[in-house]
Amino acid sequence: MFLLVLLLGLAAREVALELRPSFLRPGLHLYAYVGNSGDGTVTAVDLVKLSPTATIWVGTGPTGIRAHPTRKEIWGLSSADGSAWVLEATSNRIVARIPVGASPYALDFSPDGARAYVAASGSDSVVAIDCASRTIVGRGRAGRRPWIARVSPDGSLVVVSNRDDATVSVLDAATLQSRGTIPVAPDPEQIAILPDSSKAFVTSGSKDEISVVDLKRSALLANLALDGTPDSLVLKPDGGELYIPSSNAHGLLIVNTQTNEVGTYFLLLGMSPAAAVLTADASTLYVSDPAAGHVVPVAINIRQVAHPISVGQDPHTGQMTPGDDLLVVVDTASDELAIVRAKTSGLITLIPTGAQPHDLAIKVF
């Protein structure tokens, strides 16, 4: 019995070491934070122990959850309450609530983490928040029903998609004064900005198009016709290619960001590919297919599709942990978080969350 207990203990230790991400030093924690739209909570999940550790009520309709780049904090929005909230990662407590305006949906940080920017769809405005004092330090006007505000990589601009007037507002990040308003394809939604901050790509919510915007001149360069609905945007780290999962095209569209052309290479992926996450080394794109209940790995450099990974009933948002050790995917229908070991493309476990999980952030602290 003693030898059996000893062997079981050694086996458990080996499994724990195998699952522990390669970059994680003793004393560091790796957590996933899942926003649950069904019950207004965030579930904190320990990705080393592979278990939920806390459920925190954050407000009705949590959305836009982001890990702060420099502080031990998770930020998010309550769209119904018109507020931003700040969750302290070390204690799993809400430490601040900041009124930002009616119906906010997305949040972005300046590159240095000093400011957060939020577009309030119900008040046609954008606010800047000082992250240290958690106070509003700027307010600017956008177009009608601003959807998303994104900060350019150089930190100089805030780019806002305005759903109801088919425009993009370009604001000065320091003052939130307008630098230009650019007409784009109808119902603009998602935004991807090149690493050199020269161009932005903006999806249409009602047409199979993506608009290309020159941010230096505040001008429209092109509206590119796509072969399907642009469900999400994933930009290659060097900015050379833009990957667009399309549910009604059942595949992956690829845009050459230098020539502003939709690539001739089209990858057929499955029933309804809708979201994707790219590894840090840009070698593999993991595409979620909610209709099929799996994630499809795509080797980007050779344009090759690997065997699908079953991850639950309705997988959507996913993220990679630092070092590309784990793929973490939210399963909306089963109220679970799927954990996949990236090296073997194998499902490790499913972890319960709150009701209707939707948004996801990963934090090391």
Image (tube, rainbow, N blue to C red):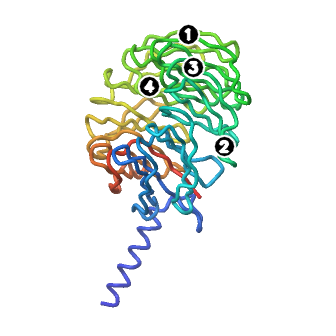
Is there CB contact under 8 Å for labels 4 and 3? no
Viewed as shown, does residue 313 lie left or right of 186? left
Is there CB contact under 8 Å for labels 1 and 4? no
Residue that label 3 marks: 257
Residue that label 4 marks: 244
Residue that label 1 marks: 183
Q: Which circle's residue, 3 or 2, is located before the other in the chain?
A: 2
**Where does the C terminus fall, quadrant-wise?**
bottom right
Q: Identity of the amino acid at label 1?
A: Pro
Residue drawn 41% across and 68% down? Answer: 15
Q: Which circle's residue, 2 or 4, is located before the other in the chain?
A: 2
The 10 Å Cα crowd at callout 1, few under 14, some 14 to 19, many 20 or more, is some
Numbered disc 4: secondary structure: strand
Task: Measure the alpha-carbon separation of dots 3 and 1.
Answer: 19 Å
The 10 Å Cα crowd at callout 2, few under 14, some 14 to 19, many 20 or more, is some
Task: Measure the alpha-carbon separation of dots 4 and 3.
Answer: 12 Å
Is there CB contact under 8 Å for labels 2 and 4? no
Of 242 and 282, which appears nearest the observer? Answer: 242
Task: Measure the alpha-carbon separation of dots 2 and 4.
Answer: 36 Å
Viewed as shown, does residue 17 lie left or right of 26? left
| Displayed quadrant of residue 119 | top right
Q: Which circle's residue, 1 or 4, is located before the other in the chain?
A: 1
Task: Measure the alpha-carbon separation of dots 3 and 2.
Answer: 37 Å
**Badge nearest the viewer, 2 or 1:** 2
Residue that label 2 marks: 135
